[in-house]
Amino acid sequence: MRSNERGQALVESILLGIVLLVPVIWMLMLLADVHRAALASTAAVREAGFDASRSDDDAAAREAVHNAVRLALTNHGFDAGDARVSWSAPAGLTRGATVEVHVEYPVSVIRLPFLGDVGGPAVWVRSTHVARVDPFRSEP
Amino acid sequence: MALALGIAQLALTLYGRNVVIASAHEGVRAATELGRDIDDAEIIARRTTRSAAGSLVNDMEVIVGTRPEGEGLLVTVRITGRLESLGPVPVPVPIDVTATSRLPEEIE
């Protein structure tokens, strides 16, 4: 090996390692955020369904769903304003009726150091929960 | 080899952090549910963390606090601890997570 080529393999290895390492770490961070969003959204729909099924009327159920989703997402470190929330009680809130809550949350793919989320494509995490109104509860 | 172990360690660290965040939320939610009290928050937060993360989280402390807010109570659950190092970097990662919820005033 010529003297001016000594260390070339090491330098190339380091450069290649950095080039391969950055996307791997980026992917890990994204997967961690998707995992956290999945935990947040499943907690949100479960608790929203639970609270809505105990509500007396549609207005109370709507507020209960909103509060439960906001609380779950905020506690997991997300902005609740980015979530899409929908709920339905086809048979009303009568005894034994079902209440379905659906939450979608976007996890941004592109994040920059010090700038955070800069928009662009997102991975949507979706959760749905069906709760049942207590079949033996007293009528309001 | 060391690089692969380091990546695995990073993945486990991120997983442990997510579990602790979720456990804090589960605990504070339990404190505000009908039929439960504040003491249940610590029990459920600890149980959730242990069942999902096992020995990944050490020196765990769960601190449950309440303070009046409006017509109810603001409940906070704070979990602190260390995420153990299972890879080539022998440095445990400290973790400090807080979750809040609101307990409505009880109707007498």
Image (spheres, grey):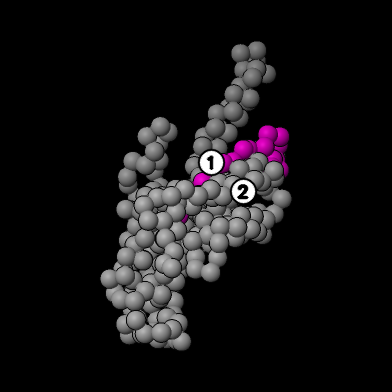
Q: Chain of mark 2?
A: B
Q: Tell which of A19 and B79 is nearer to you.
A: B79
The residue that disc 2 covers is B62
Q: Secondary structure at mark 2?
A: strand
Q: Secondary structure at mark 1?
A: helix
Give yes or no for residue B50 being in the magenta stretch: no
Q: Chain of mark 1?
A: A
The residue that disc 1 covers is A25
Q: Tell which of A104 and A98 is nearer to you.
A: A98
Residue at horizontal 69%, vertical 54%?
Answer: B54
Question: Where does the image place residue A98, in percent across and percent down from the top left?
Answer: 40, 81
Q: Quadrant of residue B94?
A: top right
Residue type marked 2: Val
Give yes or no for residue B94 being in the magenta stretch: yes
Is residue A124 something one can see in this rendering? no
Question: Where does the image place residue A4, in percent across and percent down from the top left?
Answer: 61, 13
* B47 left or right of A85 in image: right
The magenta span reads B83-101
Q: Are marks 1 and 2 in contact (CB under 8 Å)?
A: no
Residue at horizontal 43%, vertical 68%?
Answer: B108
Residue at horizontal 42%, vertical 60%?
Answer: B105
Q: Tell which of B71 and B58 is nearer to you.
A: B71
Mark 1–mark 2 Cα distance, whole angstroms, equals 31 Å
How busy is the neighbourhood of tag 1: few (under 14 within 10 Å), some, or many (20 plus)?
A: some
